[in-house]
Amino acid sequence: MDDKLVVTVSDAVKLLSISRPTLYRYIKKDPTFPKAIHLTEKKVVFRVEALKKWLASKEGVPCI
């Protein structure tokens, strides 16, 4: 995935090692989570670099 600029929802959950419901929960409730890019009505992608930066920002943050 390092050579891709954007990834699908399926690839995003793999990259972040989270479930699909957790991804949607972050999208809905975490204002710092990277914004989705809607290519079509059904096709959504995320910028890989934005996901990696968001993940790095979570280092050292205690889990709730």
Image (tube, rainbow, N blue to C red):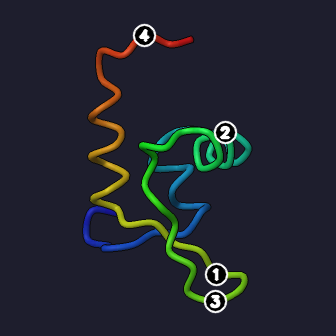
- The reply to whether dot 1 and dot 3 touch (C-beta < 8 Å) is yes
Q: Give the CA distance from mark 3 to mark 2.
A: 23 Å
Residue 32 shown left or right of residue 12 in the figure: left
Q: Mark 3 points at which residue?
A: 40
**In what element is the residue under mark 4?**
loop
Residue 57 in the image, given as x and y percentages of width and height: 28, 33
Mark 4 or mark 2: whose residue is earlier in sequence: 2
Q: Residue at x 56, y 50 (%)?
A: 13
Q: Give the CA distance from mark 4 to mark 3.
A: 36 Å
In the image, residue 2 above or below residue 14: below
Residue 14 shown left or right of residue 55 in the figure: right
Q: Give the CA distance from mark 2 to mark 1.
A: 19 Å
Q: Callout 3 environment at 10 Å: few (<14), some (14 to 19), or many (20+)? A: few
Q: Name the residue under label 1.
A: 43
Q: Give the CA distance from mark 4 to mark 2.
A: 17 Å
Indicate the amino acid at tag 4: Pro
Residue 59 in the image, given as x and y percentages of width and height: 30, 23
**In what element is the residue under mark 3?**
loop
Q: Mark 4 points at which residue?
A: 62
In the image, residue 15 above or below residue 7: above
- The reply to whether dot 1 and dot 4 touch (C-beta < 8 Å) is no
44 or 7, nearer to the observer: 44
Indicate the amino acid at tag 2: Thr
Q: Residue furthest front?
A: 31
Q: Callout 4 environment at 10 Å: few (<14), some (14 to 19), or many (20+)? A: few
Mark 1 or mark 4: whose residue is earlier in sequence: 1
Q: Residue at x 59, y 74 (%)?
A: 44
Q: Name the residue under label 2.
A: 22
* The C terminus sits in image quarter: top right
In the image, residue 6 above or below residue 23: below
18 or 43, nearer to the observer: 43
